[in-house]
Image (spheres, rainbow, N blue to C red):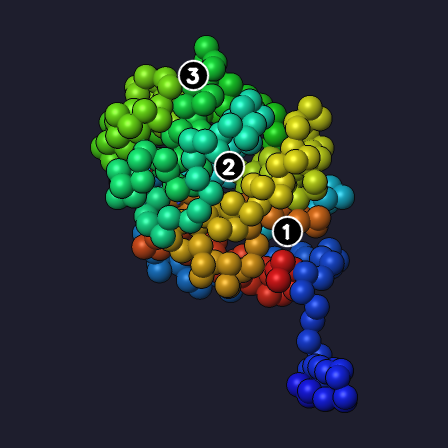
Amino acid sequence: MSVNLQGNTISITDQNTHHLANQMLDTQALPMILQQIHQDVIEEYGKGNVADYIPALAKVNPHQFGMAIRTVDEQEFSIGAADTAFSIQSISKLFTLMLALDIVGDDLWKRVGREPSGMRFNSLVLLDSEGGIPRNPFINAGAMVVTDIIAARSAAPARRIEEFIASLSGNDANRIDQLVAAGEQATGYRNIAIANLLKGMGNLEAEVEQTLDCYFKQCAMTMSCRDLARAIECLANRGRSHFKSSFHGEKMDKRINSLMLTCGLYDAVGNFAYNVGLPAKSGVGGGIVAICPGQYSVAVWAPELDHYGNSVLGQLALEKLTFYTHTSIF
Ligand code: DON
């Protein structure tokens, strides 16, 4: 790099063949890039552990990998187990946030913050000291408040969430796995504690059991990478969705993408932004969804998790994707 001082003007020339940030995706190269990513990441099998605190997830074959990309002009590219349905877990928090914002608008922010917590996703620490207002809608406490908004205003809230998510992906086969939900309910001691604390501090409208039931069920939705990439298309495409014409996403994409960028991977979000540079949301089923605004949505799945509860291969695959395609937002 050379810096020339000429009078008052400073011109900086980068003499490397350096790429511009956020280039247009070269879709012709994408099939080969996906093959390369697949080949690279499966060498990392064995570097994480499947979530074992949810009984059904402990039984999942750890060595699986799938990835699907959907461009805003409706082209789809995939590799590996992109059509295998898996437990979306915390990725559901993205969909309930869209739905709750659609229902109550900005009133939602009276009950949930918009700051990263720097704590594990199921931490209780800040909730007590911060008066029962969760830091953001993606940690478990914040997601429960968001779910409570839906639960308190609907006769069959879990069904409503299920239908909303299914309609975003255009696939009615996307359903709650009742066995996963029941297993999580039976062992969800931390979540039960969080819900009781929220109720005790006046930040749940519905009964604790009702909100928790709905929360466990939304986490137990099963979807494939392909359907997830379709379901979040609206966040890449200024609120427009090929599958759900009545979704009022227009004003939501900026807000939800910014929350994903700052809170989507919990206490690992800084490193993820540094390495990948896309807004994203993870789940302990091993899925991660991400958005390249104006260009594409992507979903990746590999069940082995790191210490933070995020997919090891999923993070690596997304890092390689933005590296090979030059499509980080930065
Ligand atoms: O509530 C829980 O702990 C799980 N149902 C969801 C947690 C989760 O997916 C966190 N994401 N990485």
Q: Which amino acid does label 2 sit on?
A: Leu
Q: Distance between the residues labelled 1 and 3?
A: 34 Å
Q: How crowded is mark 3: few (under 14 residues within 10 Å), some or many (20 or more)?
A: some
Distance, label 2 to label 3, CA atoms, is 19 Å
Identity of the residue drawn at 65% across and 33% down: 249
Q: In this view, does 95 lie above or below 257?
A: above
> How many neighbours does mark 1 have within 10 angstroms: few (below 14), some (14-19), or many (20 or more)?
many
Specify the amino acid type for callout 3.
Ala
Residue holding disc 3: 152
- In this rendering, the answer to whether 1 lies above or below 162 is below
Q: What residue type is labelled 1?
A: Cys
User: Which quadrant of the figure has residue 127?
Assistant: top left
* Residue 161: % across, % down: 50, 23
Question: What residue is shown with label 1?
Answer: 292
Instruction: Report which residue position mark 2 lands on.
Output: 94
Residue 34 percent across, percent down from the top left: 61, 57
For marks 2 and 3, the one nearer the N-term is: 2
Quarter containing the C terminus = bottom right
Question: Can the viewer see residue 307?
Answer: yes
| Helix, strand or loop under label 3 | loop
Name the residue located 68 percent from the left edge and 57 percent from the top edge: 30
Query: Given this view, does label 2 or label 3 mark the residue nearer the observer?
Result: 3
Q: Position of residue 311 (x, y in %)?
A: 42, 51
Q: Quadrant location of residue 277?
A: bottom right
Answer whether residue 80 is visible to the viewer in this image: no
What kind of element bears circle 2? helix
Q: Earlier in the sequence, mark 1 or mark 3?
A: 3
- Of 204 and 32, nearer the camera is 204
